[in-house]
Image (spheres, rainbow, N blue to C red):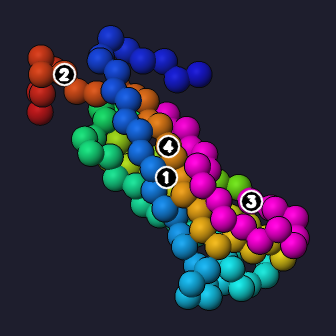
Amino acid sequence: MKKFLTHPIGIEQGENVLFSEFADGGDMWTGQGPRERRTHIRFKEAFRTPPVVQIGISLWDVDTSSALRAEVQAEHITAEGFDAVFRTWSDTRIARIRASWTAIGEVAHPDDWNIS
């Protein structure tokens, strides 16, 4: 469980196209076996500490001739951003993926003291 102190809580949301490979014949569309795409997402404003990030697929354009095998995760989460990671495997063919995400965490307050 993530517990927040008495600091204000910030919420940021966004959507990002992780890849679009149908038109140029990229290996997400033409390949087989394990494949992965990473997109670094940078927050508009840094959180005080690494936030909790919820990520999901908001658009998928896939070939329906095989089973759909996929996972999407937020990895390497820092106060400044995270990596949106999409993976597929076997004979699944993915033309395009868009992910939506929500980050929730502590943000700085103007009354915070900076003693260094």
Q: Secondary structure at mark 3?
A: loop
3 or 2: tag closer to the N-terminus: 3
Q: Is residue 102 left or right of residue 22?
A: left
Residue type, label 3? Ala
Residue type indicated by callout 1: His
Circles 2 and 4: CB distance less than 8 Å? no
Q: Residue furthest top?
A: 6
Q: Which mark is residue 111?
A: none
In the picture, residue 48 is in which quadrant?
top left
- Name the residue tied to disc 3: 70
Kindly report the distance in space between the C-alpha atoms of the residues bearing marks 3 and 1. Answer: 19 Å
Q: Mark 3 and 4 residues: CB-CB less than 8 Å, in contact?
A: no
Picture disc at residue 101:
4
For label 1, the residue is 76
Residue 67: quadrant of the picture: bottom right
Q: Which residues are magenta?
A: 52-70
Q: CA distance from mark 2 to mark 4?
A: 24 Å
